[in-house]
Image (cartoon, rainbow, N blue to C red):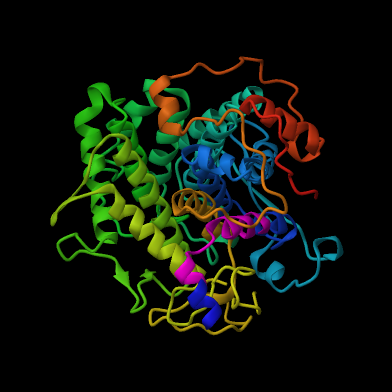
Amino acid sequence: MLVLEALIAEGFNYGDALDKTLMFFEAQRSGDHVKFGLPMAYTVTMLAWGAIDFRKELTDLDQMGHALWSIGWGTDYFMKAHTRPNVLWAQVGDGDSDHYCWERAEDMTTPRTAYKLDQNHPGADLAGETAAALAASAIAFKPYNSSYSNLLLLHAKQLFTFADRHRGLYDDSIQNAKKFYTSSGYSDELLWAAAWLYRATDDEYFLKYVVDNAVYMGGTGWGVKEFSWDNKYAGVQILLSQILLEGRAGAYTSTLKQYQAKANYFACACLQKNDGYNIHKTPGGLMYVREWNNLQYASAAAFLLAVYSDSLSAANAKLTCPEGQIPPQELLDFARSQADYFLGKNPKSMSYLVGYGPQYPIHVHHRGPDQNDNFSDDRSNYEQTEPTLSGCAPLVGLFSKLQSVSGAAGNYHEKAPVPHPATPPSYHETRKRQEPSKSQEAPSGIPSLNNQDMDSWTNNILQAQGDNQKTGLRSQ
């Protein structure tokens, strides 16, 4: 308890928490055996968003290489699974039998049935989310490997067209997924994919799509109080608010302002300033949505508010709530409050990030506490103790941002990093300068990232950054 009090007094080491989070993604390359496409694609989208908006922060922490490696692990898989323009292999394995398998993947004997989406078996939600993941990843990779970025965009555009033309719920086509990751709809994913494709390409077609479908698909109608692998509306609304705040809305300004009104609804609800229509919080201050893996909602909301805080600050704007004009710092304060709860500032004085701090879950099957801040560290209690990629993905961007503003030096590197001779600009600085891409090589002959020599790939990143110091990517 005294150790935790000392940690709180000194301030949490978000850099150390970031390191542990990235280690989790590396460990999960040999993790849960069944591959569920919808939460997996959302995970990659969120990792990429963090790498885009907090590029400078991740680079200063020597973690950009690690983040891109995690993203590339997913995007390589998605491109291999996208075997034809209208075919996406969406799941591998059976959720029931795989969850009873507690051995390493190399020793498995359970069937590895693969399930695909096509014209006759549509899944606009999953195909749309995969398109979003690839489009966002294309932005993340563009400064370091423009050919790979172009290839990602090619797949993203094809998948968006497939999703838009062949609409339907993926779990109607893949019944096996329904009891594990049921989809509530596909309209949010279509808007989400189009918004990311606009951000990646500046092609007006995609911006017009989110405007033309704003009402029909609920983008300007739904005011929500959660953001997750299933419900993307808050993400769409904040993403389009960023475009508005950057002055890129043009003739579509009025509709994007309607999207921003819903983004403000979400942010104000998180801050308890939404005229009574607020998120629920536990007595200890954690955002609480539902008992199953609740921390995923808190981490996602914290990330969104950190992103929105930066965008409002860059535009010298404030958040408009029913209870007044709110400075951007208050959004970041909310994000920090959730992160601090995760790391130990809670009634249990427990870190819910395994490996961080003096006390954390050890019977991992960690999803977090219940609505009364209670937690049972029991592996069979999978509502609370099962970790997920989708819950951890927002933490990469969140922890990097909080570390950058905390003033703490961090002690998670074995050796202090050599100062960068040239620091990459932030996303907002890049947008203002509208720099052309560094090269326009044809997107052909790109080997899989997970088959490349790691040191060579790292050097390519560093060369693009203007940095002659290796980031020390961990060996596999």
Q: Quadrant of residue 311?
A: top left
Confirm whether residue 308 shows in the render.
yes
Indicate whether 281 appears above or below 12.
below
Q: In front here: 460 or 363?
A: 460
- Extent of the magenta region: 7-23
**Which residue does the image show at 67% across and 39% down from the upper left?**
418
In screen coordinates, is 63 left or right of 329?
right
Q: Is residue 347 highlighted in magenta?
A: no
Residue 310 at what x, y percent from top left?
A: 36, 42
Residue 79 at what x, y percent from top left?
A: 66, 36
In screen coordinates, is 172 left or right of 34?
left
Indicate whether 120 appears above or below 183.
above
Q: Quadrant of residue 236?
A: top left
**Which residue does the image show at 37% across and 77% down from the upper left?**
284
Q: In front here: 342 or 9?
A: 9
Indicate whether 317 appears above or below 443.
below
Q: In front here: 366 or 233?
A: 366
Count of numbered labels shown in the rendering: 0
Q: Is residue 14 highlighted in magenta?
A: yes
Q: Quadrant of residue 155?
A: top right
**Which residue does the image show at 48% across and 61% down from the upper left?**
182
Residue 214 at what x, y percent from top left?
A: 27, 38
In screen coordinates, is 52 left or right of 88?
left
Residue 29 at what x, y percent from top left?
A: 72, 54
Secondary structure mostly taken by the magenta-highlighted segment of the chain = helix
Confirm whether residue 127 shows in the render.
no
